[in-house]
Amino acid sequence: MSTTSLTDRLGSLLMAPVHLLMRIIDIPLRAVQKTTGIGGMAAVFLAPNMLIFGIFVLLPLVINFVYSMTGGTAFFLSERQFVGTDQYARLFQCANYLDPMSCQEDAFWTAVGNTFWFVILQVALMIGVSLITALILNRDLAARSFWRAVFFFPVLLSPVVVGLIWKWILQRQGLLNFGLYQFGIEPYTWLTDRNWTFIATIGVSIWAHMGLYTLILLAGLQAIPKDLYEAAEMDGTKPARVFRRITLPLLMPNLLVVVVLALIKAVQIFDEVFVLTGGGPGTSTLYLTQYIYETGFASALRNPGLAAAASILMGLVLVVLTLVQLGIGQRSEKKGKR
Amino acid sequence: MKTKSLLAGAALALLMSTAAHAGDVRIMWYSDGVEGDVMKDLVGRFMKENPGINVILDNVAYSVIKDQLPVQLEAGNGPDIARVTAIKDLSRHWLDLRPLVKDAKYWDDNFGAQADWMRPDGSKQISGFMTQITLTGGYANKTLFDQAGVPLPGPKATWEEWAAASKKVKDSQKLPFAMAIDRSGHRLTAPLLSYGANYVGQDGKPAPLDKGAKDFLTKFVGWVGEGSFAKDVWVSAAGSTYRAAAEDFINGQLAFYYSGSWQVANLTTKIGNSFDWVATGSPCGPAACTGMPGGAALVAVKYTKNPKDVAAVMDWFAQEKIVKEFSERTLFLPGHKGVVDKGGLDFKTDNAFAKAALTKYVEASKTTADTALKLPGWRWSDTVYAAIVTRVGQTLAGELKLEDAFTRIDADIAQKVKDSGL
C-alpha cells in the first residue's frame, strides 16, 4: 500500500464525523433556504451574531440612553423619574467651558480637559515611541525575537498589575526614590505632584500599550519590498530621505490604523490610572471614564442618570473616532483596488 | 443500564448539591486587623454545631464593601450577611430579623443603643449588631517623642499643642511629616466637632458649613501647607476615596497619627517591638475633646433566599459569650450591653501598648460629644463626609482656594440632597 493512499484513508476516516455532521445540518438549512431564498441565507447566518450584538451592545446602549433621561439615586428604571434632558443640561451648565470651576459639574469638565490633553500627548508620544521601536526591531539585531518579546510583554499584563507595579516604583518609599537615594539624591513625592503624576500616567500607559502598536508597525515595515531600499542605497539616498520618501508613505495605512486605535484606547483610559493615582492629586489625573464610574457607582450618593449622560457623550466621541477609522479603512481598500 | 445508572447518579448528585445550596449563608467580610482569622475560626465552630447550615466567609478588601457592595445591593443582589460601616446609608437593604430571631428582647436589650444606626428612620426593625464599637483617636510614636526630648502633650492638649509638639519631633528626627489623619470624612469630623461644628440643620437635613467646621478646616489646610500634616494621603486620590495613613505610622515616619480604635490590633501586630506607641484619645478644640463614634455592623441582607438560616447565624454570633470572645481576640470594643456592663474583658494580647490603648479608648468614650453620638444614625453623614473629603482633597492639591472649597462643599451637599428626592 502506498503512503499516499494511507494518508488519504486516514484523512477520510478523520473527516467522516465532519461529513456526517454537515449532512445532518444540511437538512434544516435546505428547508430554511427554500423559505428564505439564497439571498435570505446571509441574514440567517448573521442572525446569531446580531442577536448577541443586540443583547450585549445595542440593548445596553438603549438602556443607558434611557437612564440618562432619568433622575434619582435608585438603580432600577422602574423606580427612577423621567427628567428629560436635565442631566445633559446639568453637564453643560457652565459659565466658561475652559474654566471647569465655573461649571456646575466641575469634575466632569476637569475630566474632559484632562482626557483631551492626555489623548493629544499620549497618542503623539505613543506613535513616536512605537515607530522608533518598530524601526529598531526591524533591523538585524542580535536576539531580535527576544527584544520583540520584551517590548510586547507589558501588553499581556493586566492593567491593575501595571498600575500596581508603577505605584511601587513611584510612591514616596518606592523603588525610584530608593535608587535616587543611593546616589545621594533626595527622595521626591512623584505621585503627589500634579505635573509629575500627569506625566506618569502618560508614561505608564505608553509602556503598557506600545507593544501592540509596535507589532502592527513592525508588520507594516516588513511588508515594504526590500528592493526599494536596495535601489535607494544604490542611488546613494540619505537614510532620512529614505525614511521620508519610502518608509513613511508605505507605512501610512498601518500608521493610520495605529493612530485611530491609540486614540480610542486613550479616550477610554481608566484602570491603570485608577490604581496608580486614584485620579489624584486632587483631580489632576481624573479622566472621563473614572468620572463616569465614580458618579455612577462610587460616590456617597450615586447618580446613575448623570453618569449615563456623561457616558453617552463619551460614546459619541468614540463613534466619531470609529467612523474615522472606517473611513480610513475604506480609503485604503479603494487605493489597494486601484 | 450502566449509562442509566450513571445518569441517575449524576442527577442525584445535582439534587444534593442544590439541597446544599439551600442551606448556604454567604458572609461578605472585611478586616482591619486580625478579625478575619478570628471570624474564620468562629464560622468553623458554628458549622460544627449547626451541620445543616453551610457558612461561606468571603474575605474582601474594605474598598469592596465601600464601593461594590452598595451597587450589588441596589441591584437586589449581594451576600446574605455583610460586615459594613455605611450602616445607616444602606439601611433600606437590611433584613428585618425581628420575626426571625429566637429572642427579639435579647437583641433589643443588648444591641438597642445602636439599633437606630442600622435601620431606616422610624422603623423598629432588627437589622444586625455592631461587631465593634469604634472611636476615633490619636496614636503617638512615644519613642520618637522621647528621642526628640519632647514631652507628650497631656490628656487635655489641643490640636494646636499636638501640632506644635509633633512638628518639634519631626524637625528633630528628620521625619517626612509630623502628623497624619486618614483621608476620611468620618475621621475629619472629630476635630471639626471639637471646634464646634454642627452638620445637622433644624429640618434634619445637612446645614451649611458653620464657623466651627471652617475654623478647623482652615487650620488643617494650613498645617498641611507647612508640612506638619502628611499631604500624600490626602492628595493621592480624587473624589471621596478612602486612604489610611497607618502604614506611615507603622514605618516610624510619623510622630502622631489620627485614626481610631480599630487600628489597635493592626498596630500591635505590625509594630511589634519596633517602637513604643501610645493611644492619646482625641485632641481638644474650643468646643470639645471628642472623637467620632462608629463601628462596623454585621447585618442581614433582605435579598437573601435563606432568611431562617441567616437568622440562625446571626443569633449564634450575637450570643454574649461569642461577642465577648470575638472582642477579646480581636481587641475590639464590644457593642453588646451585657458584655460591657459585666466588664472583665480579658483582651488576648501580651502587648502592654495595646492594653493601655484599649483602656484609653474606653476612657475617651466618656467625653464623646452629643452631636458625635447622633451622627452615625444620621442619614446624611456619608454625604457630608464625601463632600468634605472631595473638596478638601482638591484644596490640598492646589486646585481650589479654601473659600471656594467651602462654597463647593455646601453646593455639593445641597445637590446630593436634591438628587435623592427627599
Image (tube, helix red, strand yellow):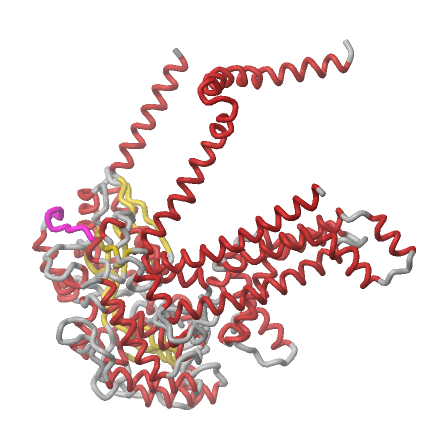
Residue A71, placed above or below residue B149: above
B305 and B89: which is toward the camera = B89
- Residue found 31% across the figure and 86% down from its top: B159
Which residue does the image show at 25% across and 40% down from the upper left?
B53
Q: Which image quarter: residue B142?
A: bottom left
What percent of the width, then of the height, locates residue B65?
33, 57
Q: Main secondary structure of the magenta part?
A: loop
State the quadrant of the N terminus of chain B.
Answer: top left
Q: Position of residue B13 (x, y in %)?
A: 34, 27
Above or below residue A97? Residue B5 is above
Which quadrant would residue B271 be assigned to in this image?
A: bottom left
Residue B153 horizontal/vertical position (percent): 32, 88
Where does the C terminus of chain B fall, quadrant-wise? bottom left
Picture coordinates of residue A143, whole percent (x, y): 77, 52
Residue B409 falls left or right of residue A327: left
Report the front residue among B293 and B281.
B293
- Bounds of the magenta span? B94-102
Q: Which residue is at the front of the view, B384 or A60?
A: A60
- Whether residue B91 is visible to the viewer of this picture, yes or no, is yes
Residue plotted at (28% across, 35% down): B20
Q: Is residue A139 left or right of residue A299?
A: right
**Residue lying furthest left:** B105
Give the camera-side residue of B417 and B367: B417
Residue B38 appears in the picture as rendered: no
Q: Is residue B280 above or below residue B62?
A: below
Q: Residue furthest top?
A: A1
A185 on left or right of A291: right
Residue drawn at 23 percent across, 71 percent down = B293
